[in-house]
Amino acid sequence: MITQDSGYIMQLQNMSVNDGEGIRTNIFLAGCPMTCPWCSNPEGQTLINPMTKITTVDEVVTFVKKQMLFYRYSGGGVTFSGGEATVQAEFLRSMTNAFYDRGISLAIETCGAFAFPVVKDILAKMDTIFIDIKHMDPVQHKKWTGYALNPILENICSVDTLQSNLVIRVPLIVGVNADEENLVAILNFLRNNLRKPQIEFLPYHTYGEEKYRQLGKALPDVNFHTPTEEEQNLAIKLACAFGVEVVSYR
């Protein structure tokens, strides 16, 4: 049961250096309204499964406090991930407040599928907010994620009114969204709507395949490919041409 004191967590991962500044602890919360077939954490698409467990705020705080020396000397902190962390808003809020009050730097990775007024206070305490754009064609976005595109774009614009550092992430997947037309549409949206447009391209990988097996789920019957170095360089060149800063936390 999700409450302000407890919720469903997949993993607490120390020594992460890929999801924000410095050395971080990643907190992977379960539950997600999207069903992306390339998901690297398919166990996070549902709250309850063999790979998730109920965890209390106090347990998470105790775990995180042991890492504060690493945060202090590296400029790191805590990153909330998933799944989609905002699905468990009460639980997320309690953890956010506990870490914020201790002066711990906070970041969140989100697919953007949330009600902004409900989580605005949470997001406002984040130093960095990573939001995905999967596809800029509404039909294709719905096809691949099971979720509408427009609310995501509206939430990106709303988040941009906060003081947090906003980074748009694009999972670069050949066969889905790595074509020039889609990339131009994404970059044009960022250039026209964000104060300081930043983008991070994340090449498709197959790290989640073993988790499908552990969950007893069939692998998605899709034909995805990791972009070549040339295709990745094209995306970077396009971003530069649109005046969108390319960043990397990898």
Image (cartoon, grey):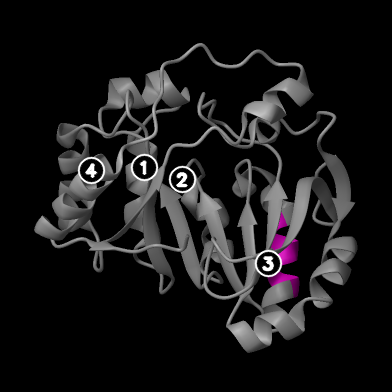
Which comes sooner in the sequence, label 3 or label 2? 3
Whether residue 187 is in magenta: the answer is no
Indicate the secondary structure of the residue bearing disc 4: helix
The residue labelled by disc 4 is 230
For discs 2 and 1, the disc positioned in front in the rendered view: 1
Q: Which residues are magenta?
A: 92-98
Q: Write down the residue under mark 2.
A: 112
Kindly report the distance in space between the C-alpha atoms of the residues bearing marks 2 and 1: 8 Å
Q: Dot 1: within a 10 Å radius of its alpha carbon, few (fewer than 14), some, or many (20 or more) residues? A: many
Residue identified by numbered label 3? 96
Quadrant of the rendered structure where residue 195 is? bottom left
Q: Which residue does the image show at 41% across and 23% down from the upper left?
A: 224
Q: Nearer the viewer, mark 3 or mark 4?
A: 4
Q: Residue 86: where, in percent of width, then height? A: 61, 48
Q: Dividing the image into 4 quarters, which one contains the N terminus?
A: top right
- The residue identified by callout 1 is 133
Looking at the picture, tell me which residue is in the foreground, 52 or 223.
223
Residue at disc 2, secondary structure = loop
- Spatial CA distance of label 2 from label 4 is 29 Å
Q: Earlier in the sequence, mark 2 or mark 1?
A: 2
Question: Picture coordinates of residue 142 (x, y %)?
Answer: 39, 22
Neighbourhood count class around disc 3 (C-alpha, 10 Å): few under 14, some 14–19, many 20 upward: many
Check residue 97 for magenta coloring.
Answer: yes
**Label 2 close to label 4 by CB (< 8 Å):** no
Question: What amino acid type should be assigned to the residue bearing mark 4?
Answer: Glu
> Residue flagged by tag 1: what amino acid is it?
Ile
